[in-house]
Amino acid sequence: MKKWIYLWGICILSVLLVVGCSNESESGLVAKKEDLENSLFKSDRYQFTLIDNKLEVIGHYNTMEKEYTFDEIYFPEGGSTNTKVWKEYDNVKVKTDAENYSITADGLSITFKKFMNHIITDEEGNEFIKIKLE
C-alpha cells in the first residue's frame, strides 16, 4: 500500500512539474502598445514619453552608475558624467511580443520588458516607472 502512495505522489509531482514549466509567459503579463501611449516612464537617469507616435527621451550619462540601454545608444564610446540627452523621434513604431515591447524609429531600436503593470525594464534590467499623463 505504501508503494502505491509513493508512486501516486511521484506521478502527481511529475504532472505539477510539467505544468509549472510550460512555455506560456511566466509573469502572465501581456505587453500592448497602449501601455506605453500617453505615459511618462521614469528611471533614475532617463525618462521617455510616447505621444501620438512621437517619442521623447531625456536623461544624462553618469560614469559612476550602472549602465542603461540608452547609454549604449547615445554614448557608445562613453561620455563624461552628467552629459545631457534630449532626443525626439517621429514615426515611432511599437511591436509587442508576449511581455516585450520593441520600439523603433529613425536610428533607434530598443526593447523593454513588462515587469509589472506600471513598471517596465530595459535590456540591462533597469526599471522605468509609469506615470499616466492626463
Image (tube, rainbow, N blue to C red):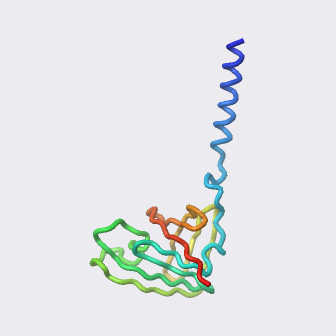
Residue 38 image position (x, y, % from top left): 61, 81
| Side of 44 where 41 appears, left or right | right
Outermost top residue:
1
Where residue 104 appears, as percent x and y from the top left, is: 55, 77
Residue 72: image quadrant is bottom left
Residue 58 placement (x, y as % from top left): 44, 82
Number of on-image labels: 0
- Image height of 49 relative to 115, above or below: below
**Residue closest to the eye, 6 or 134:** 134
The quarter holding residue 17 reads: top right
Which image quarter is the N terminus in? Answer: top right
> What residue is rendered at 64% in x and 64% in y?
97
On screen, 32 above or below 4? Answer: below
At horizontal 70% and vertical 18% (from top left) the residue drawn is 5
Whole-percent x, y for residue 83 in the image? 32, 82
Quadrant of the image containing the C terminus: bottom right
Q: What residue lies at 64% left-to-right and 66% top-to-bottom?
A: 31
Name the residue: 52% across, 86% down. Answer: 89
